[in-house]
Amino acid sequence: MLFRQMKYFAAVVDCSSFTEAAEQCYISQSAISQQIQALEKELGVTLLHRENRRFSLTPAGEYFYSQSRGILAEVERVSKETIRIGQDDELRLRIGYPRCYSGQELYQAVAEFSRIYPEVSIHIVNGTHEELYDLLRFSGVDLIINDQRRAFSDRYVNYQLLQCICHAEVSAGSSLSEREFVEIDDLKHMSCILVASREQQNTEEEYFKNTLGFGGSFLFAENLEEGRLMVAGNRGFLPVESVGTLPPAGPAIRRIPIVRNGQPLRRNYCVFWLKERGNYYMEEFAAILRELLCVDS
């Protein structure tokens, strides 16, 4: 059996057409038909029931197709990884993290990982939730540290770090600044300041409003520093998560836990990477970061 015949068969089933499959595989229709007939002859079973211009899968054909897709995907993954290793002059790990993150453990994890694996070059970028997922999906980064906003996907390794408590950073001059905690409903009269690029503002506002339940109006900052300057000027509150040890916000700002019906508002944070591109270094970095977060939590 030729690997090429398996590929042709899968293409015919995917396209539901010998003609379209032949175009996709850059061969003639007669050639692809002959190859599948040769495959059936070699296996000694019928894979396709042919009815004029239509066809249907036999039980043997359905099994062969399902197994072929897995084999073809694995061969493609191995090929891509082999090419990547052969073309890379250096080992590298590209990490994405939230633009609003300010915890210390990420920096400690990078330093510890570099100490253990000095041969690996680390590249770091930040972005909003959706920007990070786009970078991961389109190979802009190898892994991301991000909050969970959707059901876990089987395509990814969903390496859970911790559930963290949400805080509101408010001006020291705000009427809320002396509270031990603040109910989410008490924040609705204040503007919510979100760190987001112009392109992601609507997406971030929709999530914080409809999923987390933040009301009132929304203001936007390009980065965490700009957001905290807005807080210091008493323009609103800045929601932040205690992903590890947060440094002091500064004398002009108070950080207060947010509760809903008396219970702390929590967010789930994970490290994500595509299963098909996973490797030992990603697993090691994620384990180092989780250990640091657990020690300090």
Image: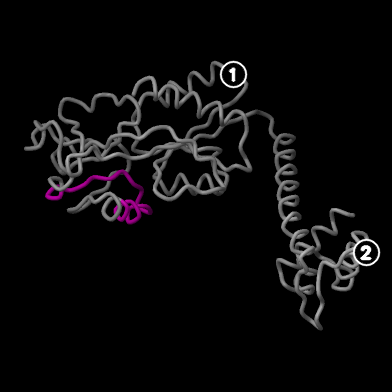
| Residue 276 relative to residue 46: left or right | left
Residue at image coords 75%, 59%: 63
Counting the numbered discs, the total is 2
Determine crowd level at label 2: few under 14, some 14-19, many 20+ residues with C-alpha closer than 10 A: few
Place of residue 59 in the rendered image (x, y in percent of width and height, measured from the top left): 76, 65
Is residue 212 on the magenta stretch? no
- In this rendering, the answer to whether 200 lies above or below 172 is below
Vertical arrangement, residue 22 with respect to residue 262, above or below: below
* Contact check, label 1 and label 2, Cβ < 8 Å: no
Residue 64, disc: none
Residue drawn at x 93%, y 64% as measured from the top left: 41
Q: Which circle's residue, 1 or 2, is located before the other in the chain?
A: 2
Q: Magenta segment, which residues?
A: 188-207
Closer-to-camera residue (217/262): 262
Q: Amino acid at mark 1?
A: Pro
Cα separation between marks 1 and 2: 55 Å
Q: What x and y, as percent, mark residue 52?
A: 81, 83
Q: Image quarter for residue 90? A: top right
Can you give x and y, in whole percent of width and height, for residue 206 in the image? 31, 56
Q: From the image, which quarter does the N terminus lie in? A: bottom right
Report the residue at 42% width, 27% height from top. Answer: 106
Color encoding of the figure = one colour
Closer to viewer: mark 1 or mark 2: 2
Which residue is denoted by mark 1 in the rendering? 118
Numbered disc 2: secondary structure: helix
Q: Residues within 10 Å of mark 1 (few under 14, many from 20)?
A: few
Quarter residue 31 falls in: bottom right
In front: 91, or 45? 45
Q: Residue furthest left?
A: 175
Q: Which mark is residue 41?
A: 2
